[in-house]
Amino acid sequence: MWIYGDALLRDLVPSVAPCLPPCLPPCLPPCLPSVPSGSGLSVMPRARGALMEPVRVLELYSGIGGMHFALKGCGISAQVVAAVDINTTANHIYKHNFPSTPLWSKSIEGIPLEDFNKLSIDMILMSPPCQPFTRLGLKRDVVDQRTKSFLYVLDLLPRLSPRPRYILLENVKGFEESCARNQLMKTLNECGYHFKEIMVSPTSVGIPNSRLRYFLMAKHSDEGFSAETHSQILEAFPVHTDLDVSEQQTVLTPHQPETGPEQAQVLYKLETPTEVQRKQKQNSDMSIKQIQDFLDPDPDLDLDQYLLPPKTLLRYTNILDIVRPSCRRSVCFTKGYGRYIEGTGSVLQSSPEAEEQFLSQEFREELKGAVPVITVEQVYRGLEELSEEQRLKRLQCLRLRYFTPREVAKLMGFPQSFEFPEDVPLKQRYKVLGNSLNVCVVCKLLQILLS
């Protein structure tokens, strides 16, 4: 039984004791890339005698199947022998997309060692709950109830038979500073794993979405993997397919703000010149695709249902992150997208042309017919000096809307084959996507791990 009192937690995981606060309460609450020819990557299934068999994969915290889609898309001969999650909505979506995969709808810590050993696992894929390592989750780390299943996995790992050959873990930025990560390092070292840590965003694979995440790739030493494990965390994909970090030069360092001349025009009241410059730099990066490549092409889709309502436009005017179809950037989509505005994801300017029906008479006179395309700069210029009614009319010129769930899924690397069951409400679709991961990033990491 896992009860998170002070003494039991310290006895259970001694290595995290120094990280714990001195006093604890008695009870503590788009297409996926394939393996390119001539790349040198050779992804092989395991050998048993003369037979070649698929890699047997256990998918923990399986969510809506992001890891599974990555596994299918990167040329690996693999079989997910079990997926485990307790979220009923996520499980419903997972089962809809992978009907033949055994799905265990139960808490991980409630599954005995014997059940895991029966699976004969080659690989573990997992994305443990991130809330214990975020500011909104109060960064309670290992004393957070939501971490107990992960600690249970670490407790089981030395006793698994056979021991998994490969492990891939994903979590939020912040995990790398946690006691949970320290315990993970300790367990992997004791179990004979070599590993590499990396902080990477989908922009690294050409997707115009910022979603910086922590990843860990581990390979058991029995696999002939001789690279020395280092404590440095990379911020770019490793060059060498054997995970040798000895020659890697790019390591994670504290963020240094970009410097440069201040811009004369700041679009939003709460935007700094540095932020404007950063967005301009992102939009000029030709290695990243444009937003329009990820938009829903369905001509029958009613996009008006995704327009921001008037109250939202007026209340959150100064903090909207607005992107156009030609942009090469968007901010991270979270589980609150579609319900909340601040920090939950970008909104799309869906009316790039200055259509007469959306322009007030005053604004048409201001443009004087000389500008055929409406820009955010034009709309926001002098906006605070207008009446509420005038501000609303001007903002509505942009036809700002939320990205559809299908578009968010595409920006997160999910393939066209991914589907939501029809009975899943819009709110829940955004929520499970916000809790998921970028499929293309995981796909590339899997190719590296198994190469």
Image: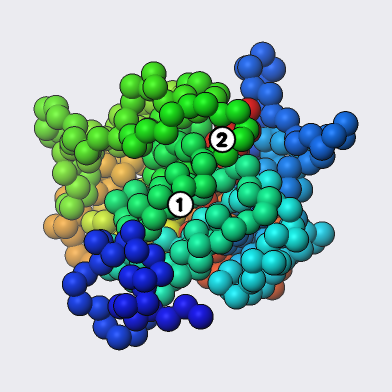
Instruction: Look at the numbered disc 1 and give the secondary structure of its residue.
Output: helix
Q: Circle 1 is placed at which residue position?
A: 187
In primary-sequence order, the first of circles 2 and 1 is: 1
- Image coords of residue 191 (percent x, y): 52, 47
Label 1: how many residues lie within 10 Å, few (<14), some (14-19) or many (20+)?
Answer: some
| C-alpha separation, residue under disc 2 versus residue under disc 1 | 14 Å
Please, is residue 443 above or below residue 284 in the view? below
Task: Find residue 54 and report its image quarter.
Answer: top right
Badge count: 2
Residue at horizontal 33%, vertical 70%?
Answer: 10
Answer whether residue 407 is visible to the viewer in this image.
Answer: no
- Image coords of residue 157 (percent x, y): 56, 56
The residue lying toward the viewer, choosing from 427 and 118, is: 118
Answer whether residue 60 is visible to the viewer in this image.
Answer: yes
Instruction: Determine contact: label 2, label 1, CB under 8 Å.
Output: no
The residue lying toward the viewer, choosing from 255 and 52, is: 52
- Image coords of residue 375 (percent x, y): 33, 41
Of all residues, the one furthest to the top in this rendering is 38
Label 2: how many residues lie within 10 Å, few (<14), some (14-19) or many (20+)?
Answer: some
Please, is residue 253 above or below residue 349 in the view? above
Q: Circle 2 is placed at which residue position?
A: 221
